[in-house]
Image: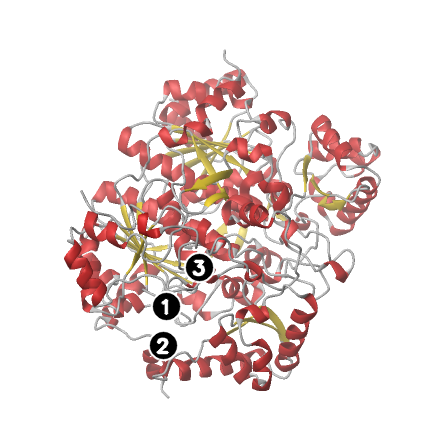
Amino acid sequence: MSKKEKEQILVRYGSSRKEREDFLKAMISPEGKPEVLDDVVVLDVSYANMSGDIASSIFAEFGAEVIKIEPPEGDPSRKVTPYGVNRNGVGIPFIMEARNKRYFTLDLSKESARDDFKKLAAKAHIVIETFKPGQMDSWGIGYRQLSQINPGLVYIAISPYGQYGKKAQEFINVPDSDITSQAASGLPANIGDMEHMGEPYNWPLKAGVWLGWYITGIEAALGGAVARYYMQATGEGQMVDVATADAFASLVGYPVTMGFTWDRARPRIGRHDFAIYPYGFWPCKDGMVAIAAGRDHDFRGLLKILKIWKEEDDWRYVFDRIPDIVEQVEKLYKMIADETMKYTSDELVKMAVDYSIKSAKSKWRGGGVPIVMKVQKPVTTMQNPHWAKRKSFTEFEDSQLGKFIMPANFIKMSDSPPRVKWVRCGIGQDNAYILDKYLK
Amino acid sequence: MEDYFNYTKNLFDPTKVQEKPEVFKGLRVLDFTHVVYGPTTAKILGQYGAEVIKFELPWVGDLWRFGVLWGSFWRHSSVCFHFVQYGKYFFSLNLKLPKAKEIILKMAEQADVVVENFAAGTTDAWGIGYSQLSKANPGIIYISCATYGQYGPMRFFPGWDLLAQAASGVISLTGYPDTDKYYKLPDYVGDFLPGNVGALAVIMALNQRKKTGKGQYIDLAQTEALMRIIPNFTYHSITGEDLGRSGNTDPTMAPSGIFKTCDGKFVAIAAVTDEQYKAICEAMGHPELVNKYKDTFERLKPENAKELYDATAKWVGTSSAGNLVELAKKHGFSFAVVEDDYDITNDEWRRERGSVIVFTDDMYGKLNIPGPSAMLSKTPGRIKWLSRPLGYHNRYILKKILGYSEEEIKQLEKERVVGYWDDRPGIKPPVYYDIEKDPIFNYKGE
């Protein structure tokens, strides 16, 4: 079967196929397109908390002029980096979030600097801060004071437990970090092996990604964008309060709702999934493959391609396969693993794709779409030609930071896409520019 | 001057949320999505006041109506469906029939946003793609949520949260180094996070439309959204090495980790700054460590980080969680107790804040629902109702928005253009509920 035929089976195109492809291709590169926030000035005074830098990066990618304000010795976030790896004293996460920003030094603990900050805030549209609740207010540059001089200001505050309520007050001296944000919002409690696997594998496990800080950063940007939209409509600014201890629980909702309906905590179930099975990854000859074949007809398809149809009777329905009985689910896991071990990942992917095409072609439908995908490491993800075609990674160069690759261009939009124009982050490198443009 | 916490308490008062204005009031969102990723994008817009109309196939319904944990439904519905779909209008329409397409095109003329998450190109094939709807309404903002995006050689591959995690490499990062003990991220966060990014993109497009009057098309690949949040690519390009897994410590901070206390609780501790490092050393009674590793980068080197991790583990192992909380408050270092589902949903603080909402629904009764992730002082996000049975709002939408008469609706029902539920849990109303008396389901019109 030719490639074209295959594609036609997977998707029945309308008449405008060529037109659509050209349109999509033109969307891949953001160059020359307008920027949404090109009339917005953001002051980012986040300190020792990368979630603020993440939020301001997102605004910067959408075209805002983001001024990162640091004390003369720099934000301690610059040194938060895996195993101490750095370029010229700047750590990798900080480089990652140094997108399109301006760097200005101001020591807000000094009275005179606060006057400058007030002048900047009078001209700004968004402020992002991560100090302890009430710190900016006690300096006379909190939302309460700034909204007097600039009623349209959107003021985003990030802290572990928010800006109001008893716990915010009680924990005022406890600073924020990604791992504590994860712990407090119910993430590690739901990762890790089953009870009988022994310590430390059955302990709550931290996510290997900065999920606490990235969720917080994205939510802060989202809340800020909503507030900005309201400001455009009415001229009124407002305060946006993000608590990092809410991050995971508020994003996915499961901890809140399952804790209520089950009236107890869910156990940790290792690689299994509560609702869908198989939905996880299995070993094969050359690594791991992810398999998702949860619906009954998908599962039947999987049994067929793995040539274990004889087992169908025992595992026919979703509710036969859910992992509520440990022995049973481990039996099923092993049954699939015994077969996947006989093949390489490429063979398994091909078997699944061939099957899916055949079942999609059948006029009877219902043949199922078992999905098999090779488990990638970030290093191998970078080599995938799909992302090259979508320009998902970009190489940047800076005199101080050298050459490096970053994931950029992560939202494709036809009219006003986000983009990364430059990456650099010398302390105070834009002092003259800021003084000249805003403080003369 | 008024006390800061009094001021903020009044500013954000959760009891006044329903009285405050809604940002997106008057915006209409057509939601052709299913499962979690796309629906989340539409939900966020609804949370801030947009009118979200969710389309489903009659007698079939969204797959996620049956997505229940360990097979248990709650009042004949899926709780997982409730918090992904709350506040929407449930319209059940058979897209295959020409009459249904007419209805959609008519609705698109007055709509502001369209969200879909079918396989790449499917909506175009059905005649409701961006190329078609933007002709009827140039102001329309159309977002396609797919796992690999709409363009590129892998665009037709089907995907879920799991596959996005596998394709981005995120799946291999959570677990113990030098073993094959690693786990996917739980609770479909690979759907929820990109779903929120989708909402962000739509809001930016709405902003742009305010300036230009024109809508646009958004192609959001779930996998790319996950790739955006990991530093591993940059790390690799700088060091030439794979960053890999780090078990229960965060390699960007030392000491850091999740530790077990002497009373069997788990706590997370981290030193983000030099001051916090000093605070931890003092709290654990090893002030000599402060001078040993003055330099942050030096401290982060694997062998030194290991030494600090071991010292912290030993200290935590002989302290109680309650004692450690007091030390964290006194000395000022990052600290949190590991909270599970039960702790979170029963947490007084979260209820007071509004991040856990004890919601009472007309149809389903009491359910704890997550509040918005960001609290806005003037235009807070809110929840109006939980999800509804399949086709619950058919009459309401056809009469109120499209101006159909009762006879015309009966005709549509006869031709099976619109439809309802069958006897399966997940799509039908709870047994105790008398649907015949429901004023919205039996909407009479003005």
Tag 2: amino acid: Leu
Q: Report whether A153 appears left or right of B210.
A: right
* Residue pictured at 31% horizontal, 57% vertical: B391
Residue highlighted by disc 2: A10
Above or below B20: residue B52: below
Residue highlighted by disc 3: B426
Tag 1: amino acid: Ala
Q: Report whether A391 appears left or right of B184.
A: left
Chain assignment, label 1: B
Extreme-bottom residue of the structure: A1
Q: Position of residue A313 (x, y in %)?
A: 57, 81
Q: Nearer the viewer, residue B404 or B143?
A: B404
Q: CA distance from mark 1 to mark 2?
A: 9 Å
Residue A59 seen in the current view: yes
Q: Secondary structure at mark 2?
A: helix
Residue highlighted by disc 1: B119
Chain assignment, label 3: B
Callout 2 crowding tier (Cα within 10 Å): few <14, some 14–19, many ≥20: many
Chain assignment, label 2: A
**Marks 3 and 1: CB-CB under 8 Å?**
no
Lower sequence index among marks 3 and 1: 1
Q: How many marks?
A: 3
Q: Are marks 2 and 3 on the same chain?
A: no
Tag 3: amino acid: Gly
Quadrant of the rendered image containing residue B237: bottom right
The nearer-to-camera label among 2 and 3 is: 3
Above or below B386: residue B136: below
